[in-house]
């Protein structure tokens, strides 16, 4: 029971973690991307599309190779998600339009596109086979239980998410690229005066951030629910939670690993514990949002500089404007 | 100086901020965007089906204006969206990014439904309606003022705060439904008590109410001292402080008003239209209202147009979906998204203009 609970918490946490890292990267560049829920959706359909193309190219789908499935799902998800992110990037960076509005439009569009393509144009017949192969864990964890299973019993994506989170932390805190990126988010004009190529940094940050967020959805479909598809709104809801998580983790990807598992636990608690009433379940489901609000309030009350959102978050930059 | 040669060359195209733009040009830019966006959406729909582009526009219009009932529904939904936009407008004018419209509508709707549920049959309908009115307006105002207080006192990020408040509101609705609906179906049957009486026909009340609110808001923002204070706070908080405006007070007062109007939308939804509630009762108007408000560049009279246009598309797409035999409603989200993109990009061409590099010959002539 407790093992299943922790396993599911980590799995849901991983979906959120991908979204959270992606959103953190774009927010570090000063762009509040409310399109992340939509981008996670399109990432899902991209990954699923490439998996289905690969599966259909095989004569015997049972014999699909693990590495090819992982690569095709990663590639598809990254491609579609960053393409959707590119729409956001062009509209907000080049055209300097309002980020909140553009993000909301991206979410509406991404949800619709995903629902549409998944419903009619993605062949889902081999998904359960593909899902099983993608979700494969290390051989020695088969049949083991307890701590070993919780720590090592997951598929590739779970560890990949942790890896990306650590890499992102390293880049933010220890490299010049990260320093420049943070400078852009804090004060774009200063970064520009420093000679940083603002447009390039912003584009790369949004494209990469969106691509990473896209992994979340495909992980959920392929690994966690093993290839079944209901509708895009589940993934959209994860996207909004991921945005909440960015605040919760104070824009720090390494904290977000723990934070996302905690959110995952809160989210899944409502479903795992069978002996609670429906109304208690509803209250549990509200908890992640309440906690996020509390964190938001506490961090703004403490007013510590390192825990604040990037100062220029949500503002577009036009050099000739003061 | 060799190095500077590449810098001296003028870029092929550069962006310049416009100082002023004339109204006909604004209208032209918007028309191009709307027609372009619709054409693109039509082409996409055609691409995925066997129908032609003519069918797309035909069903778009029949879906919105096809029958008397459809037309009234179009007006009713437009008025609801208008009401929501009027709730969001003062907040946006103040640069307070209230993304919590959905939540504010939902809690107020929920409070109204709670009055109907608990008092229905016990006291007379007029008393219930009165209580519903106060309950929903207060609930909406409360839901909006909580983030505002923290914004005013601690500068807490309001867009994220209000966003989270939406989810708590949704959670409260599901919670109440599980408590109220004993069968466990999760669907609350329409309640027969506390229904607001019809005037004329059943669509007219919201239309009149929200047009009146729009007129009020127009005067409030344009001619009242409060409206002036809102725009100063929106332009520059430092200026506001300098001229002696109490910024905290303005933020809290404005959000109380904003939430109260959202509360009215919830009141109408509960009492006059749905008589029940679900987590989707707000119909995502909190977000579409943002679109309507922003696309109209915060002008209350233009918001009438934009909210009509947005409702027109969503109604029309229902018909398009039927004609084109798309099995799910996602195509309308795609179309709405594309049209939004087109209109959002308009704001760029209104605020900035592109200056292309002149040919060298011309330069010499000069």
Image: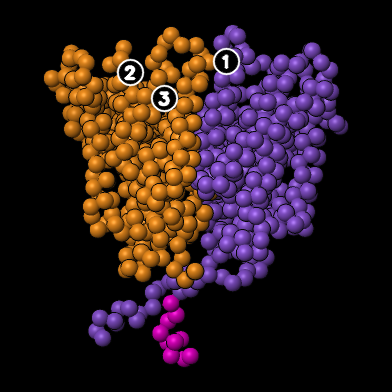
Q: Residue B289: x percent and y percent?
A: 62, 43
Sequence-first disc among 2 and 3: 2
Q: Give me the chain letter of mark 1.
A: B
Q: Give me the chain letter of mark 2.
A: A
Is label 3 in a helix, a strand or a loop? helix
* C-beta proximity under 8 Å, tags 1 and 2: no
Left or right of B329 on screen, residue B138: right
- Labels 3 and 1 within one chain: no
Determine the residue located farthest toward the bottom in the rendered image: B365
Q: Is residue B361 magenta?
A: yes
Q: Quadrant of the N terminus of chain B?
A: bottom left
Q: Please tell me which residue lies in front, B132 or B80.
A: B132
**For the residue carrying disc 1, how many other residues have a C-alpha within 10 Å: few (<14), some (14-19), or many (20+)?**
many
Residue A267: image tag: 3
- What is the magenta range? B357-366
Residue occupying image coordinates x 47% and y 24%: A285
Left or right of B67 on screen, residue A267: left
**For the residue carrying disc 2, how many other residues have a C-alpha within 10 Å: few (<14), some (14-19), or many (20+)?**
some
Residue A77 is drawn in which quadrant? top left
Of the chain colours in the picture, the one used for chain A is orange
Q: Residue A313: x percent and y percent?
A: 44, 53
Q: CA distance from mark 1 to mark 2?
A: 24 Å
Instruction: Tell me the residue that label 1 is attached to.
Output: B178
Is label 2 in a helix, a strand or a loop? helix
Instruction: Tell me the residue that label 2 is attached to.
Output: A5
Is label 1 in a helix, a strand or a loop? helix
């Amino acid at each position: 029971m407790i093992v299943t609970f922790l396993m599911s918490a980590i799995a849901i946490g991983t979906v959120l973690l991908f979204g959270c890292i992606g959103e953190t990267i774009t927010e570090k560049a000063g762009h509040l991307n409310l399109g992340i829920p939509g981008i996670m959706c399109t990432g899902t359909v991209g990954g699923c599309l490439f998996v289905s193309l690969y599966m259909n190219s095989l004569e015997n789908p049972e014999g699909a190779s693990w590495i090819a499935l992982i690569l095709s799902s990663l590639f598809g998800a990254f491609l579609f998600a960053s393409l959707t992110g590119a729409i956001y990037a062009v509209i907000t960076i080049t055209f300097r339009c309002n980020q909140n509005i553009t993000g909301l439009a991206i979410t509406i569009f991404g949800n619709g596109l995903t629902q549409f393509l998944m419903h009619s144009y993605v062949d889902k017949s081999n998904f359960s086979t593909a899902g099983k192969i993608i979700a494969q864990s290390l051989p020695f964890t088969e049949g083991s239980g307890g701590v070993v299973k919780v720590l090592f019993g997951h598929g590739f994506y779970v560890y990949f998410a942790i890896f990306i989170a650590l890499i992102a932390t390293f880049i933010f805190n220890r490299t010049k690229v990260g320093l420049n990126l943070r400078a852009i988010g804090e004060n774009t004009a200063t970064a520009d005066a420093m000679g940083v190529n603002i447009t390039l940094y912003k584009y790369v940050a949004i494209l990469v951030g969106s691509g990473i967020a896209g992994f979340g959805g495909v992980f959920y479909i392929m690994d966690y629910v093993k290839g079944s598809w209901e509708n895009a709104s589940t993934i959209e809801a994860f996207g909004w939670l991921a945005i909440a998580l960015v605040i919760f983790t104070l824009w720090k990807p390494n904290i977000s690993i723990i934070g996302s598992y905690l959110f995952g636990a809160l989210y899944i608690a409502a479903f795992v514990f069978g002996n609670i009433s429906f109304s208690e379940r509803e209250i549990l489901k509200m908890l992640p949002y309440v906690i996020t609000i509390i964190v938001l309030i506490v961090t703004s009350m403490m007013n510590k500089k390192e825990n604040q959102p990037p100062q220029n978050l949500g503002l577009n930059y036009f050099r000739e404007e003061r | 100086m060799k190095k500077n040669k590449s810098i001296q060359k003028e870029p092929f195209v550069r962006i310049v901020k416009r100082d002023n733009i004339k109204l006909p040009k604004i209208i032209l830019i918007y028309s191009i965007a709307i027609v372009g966006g619709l054409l693109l959406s039509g082409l996409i729909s055609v691409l995925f089906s066997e129908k032609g582009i003519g069918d797309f526009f035909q069903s778009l219009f029949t879906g919105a204006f096809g029958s008397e009932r459809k037309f009234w529904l179009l007006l009713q939904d437009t008025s609801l969206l208008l009401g929501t936009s009027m709730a969001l407008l003062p907040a946006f004018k103040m640069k307070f990014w209230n993304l919590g419209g959905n939540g504010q509508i939902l809690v107020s709707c929920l409070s109204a439904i709670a009055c109907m549920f608990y008092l229905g049959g016990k006291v007379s309908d007029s008393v219930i309606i009165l209580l519903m009115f106060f309950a929903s307006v207060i609930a909406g105002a409360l839901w909006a003022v909580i983030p505002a207080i923290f914004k005013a006192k601690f500068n807490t990020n309001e867009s994220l705060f209000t966003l989270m408040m939406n989810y708590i509101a949704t959670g409260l609705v599901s919670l109440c439904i599980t408590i109220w609906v004993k069968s466990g179906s999760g669907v609350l049957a329409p309640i027969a008590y506390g229904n607001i009486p019809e005037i004329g026909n059943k669509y007219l009340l919201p239309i009149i109410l929200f047009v009146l609110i729009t007129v009020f808001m127009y005067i409030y923002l344009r001619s009242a001292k409060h409206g002036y204070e809102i725009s100063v706070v929106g332009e520059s908080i430092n200026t506001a402080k300098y001229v002696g405006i109490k910024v905290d007070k303005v933020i809290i007062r404005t959000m109380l008003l904003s939430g109260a109007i959202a509360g009215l939308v919830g009141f109408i939804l509960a009492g006059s239209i749905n008589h029940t509630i679900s987590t989707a009762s707000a119909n995502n108007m909190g977000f579409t209202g943002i679109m309507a408000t922003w696309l109209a560049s915060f002008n209350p009279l233009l918001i009438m147009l934009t909210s009509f246009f947005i409702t027109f598309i969503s109604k029309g797409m229902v018909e398009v979906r039927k004609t084109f035999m798309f099995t799910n409603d996602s195509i309308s989200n795609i179309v709405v998204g594309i049209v939004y993109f087109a209109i959002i990009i308009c704001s760029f061409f209104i605020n900035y203009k592109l200056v292309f590099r002149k040919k060298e010959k011309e330069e010499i002539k000069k």
